[in-house]
Image (tube, rainbow, N blue to C red):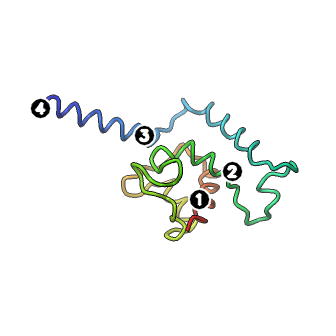
Amino acid sequence: MKKLLFSLFFAMLLVLGACGGGGDEGASEDNTSEEQTDQSSQDESGESAEDSGGEGATDSAGAEGVYQNNCSSCHGGELGGGFGPALTEVGSKYDAAKIVDIIKNGKGQMPAQSQVSDEDAQTVADWLATME
């Protein structure tokens, strides 16, 4: 009986740990990754993806960086799913506004992702909304 309880407890810890935690302990890592994302989103001409594409452009390099840092542990590195559902066709189900709402408030078993800034949530949502 003790082994069963220990196994259940350990499994719960793994699941909760994989979905992120939030808090200030990763703040310095987030700043570094944002700087790397900003640098990687510049093309050879020196323009960022946001500058070169006009008003409706999606910063896919920035969005992918935010996704890898905050979402891929549950939804898979290639959007294919894992503990969380696959996001390869999420744009056919939800628009960007609904995706932001899900990121910020959670849905079903997905907890609210309070460690993701409003700007990053919008960037990822705009990118995911193109996945159809």
Can you give x and y, in whole percent of width and height, for residue 64 in the image? 62, 50
Label 1: which secondary element: helix
For label 2, count other residues whose C-alpha is less than 10 Å away and answer few (under 14), some (14-19) or many (20+). Answer: many
Please give the name of the residue rendered at 59% of the width and 59% of the height, measured from the top-left corner: 125
Image x and y of residue 129, in percent = 58, 65
Amino acid on which the number 1 mark rests in the picture: Ala
Q: Find residue 68 and report its image quarter.
A: top right
- Image point (82%, 59%), residue name: 52
Look at 67% across and 34% down and name the residue there: 32
Mark 1–mark 2 Cα distance, whole angstroms, equals 13 Å
In the image, residue 46 sits, relative to residue 54, either above or below, namely: above
Disc 4 residue crowd, few under 14, some 14–19, many 20+, Cα 10 Å: few
Type of the residue with mark 4: Met
Q: Quadrant of the N terminus?
A: top left
What is the number of the mark on residue 125?
A: 1
Which one is in front in this view, the residue at disc 1 or the one at disc 2?
2
Q: Which mark is residue 61?
A: 2
Q: CA distance from mark 4 to mark 2?
A: 49 Å
How many neighbours does mark 3 have within 10 angstroms: few (below 14), some (14-19), or many (20 or more)? Answer: some
Q: Are marks 4 and 2 in contact (CB under 8 Å)?
A: no
Pick out the residue farthest to the left. 1
- Residue 18 shows which numbered tag? 3
Q: Looking at the image, which is closer to me, 7 or 119?
A: 7
Give the camera-side residue of 59 and 113: 59
Picture coordinates of residue 62, whole percent (x, y): 68, 49
How crowded pointer 1 is (Cα within 10 Å; few <14, some 14-19, many 20+) is rated as many
> In the image, what residue occupies the spot 61% across and 46% down?
66
Instruction: Find the distance from the CA under tag 1 to the CA under tag 4.
Output: 44 Å
Q: Name the residue carrying label 4.
A: 1
Place of residue 61 in the rendered image (x, y in percent of width and height, measured from the top left): 69, 50
Mark 3–mark 4 distance (CA, rounded to whole Å): 26 Å
Q: Is residue 36 left or right of residue 129?
A: right
